[in-house]
Amino acid sequence: MKIGSTQWVKSSYSSPEGGNCVECCPTSGMVTGAIRIRDSKTPQGPVLSFPADSFAEFVACVKAGEFSL
């Protein structure tokens, strides 16, 4: 979904049926230094913003299995 010049990308883990879906704006990190995340079911709702380096570290930890359910 594109809003203005912002390109939102839906998580590959999101299903077409809805459910728990997130979108991120990866290009925002290049412009502002912050990665933006929102709920894809409510695109006009709140947007969370994280420093790009912190978000990259979080993703690396998730991929490494450092968090348990």
Image: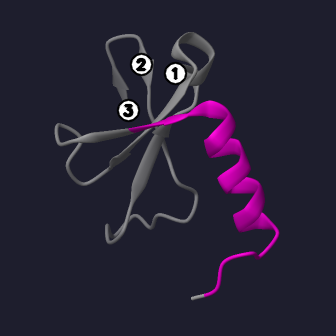
Magenta residue span: 49-68
Q: Is residue 19 left or right of residue 36?
A: left
Earlier along the polypeptide chain: callout 1 or callout 2?
Answer: 2
Residue at left offset 74%, top offset 75%: 66
* Residue 8, position as x, y percentages in the image: 44, 33
Whether residues under marks 2 and 3 lie with C-beta atoms below 8 angstroms apart, the answer is no
Callout 2 amino acid: Thr
Check disc 1: other Cα within 10 Å, few if <14, some if 14-19, many if 20+: some
Q: Position of residue 25 (x, y in %)?
A: 49, 32
Residue neighbourhood size for the residue with mark 2, other residues' Cα within 10 Å, grouped as few (<14), some (14–19), many (≥20): few
Main secondary-structure element of the magenta-colored stretch: helix
Q: Residue furthest right?
A: 64
Image quarter where the N terminus lies is top left
User: What amino acid does circle 1 point to?
Assistant: Ser
Check disc 3 and report its element: helix, strand or loop: loop
**Label 1 residue SS:** helix
The residue carrying mark 2 is 6
Residue at label 1? 28
Q: Is residue 18 above or below residue 56?
A: below
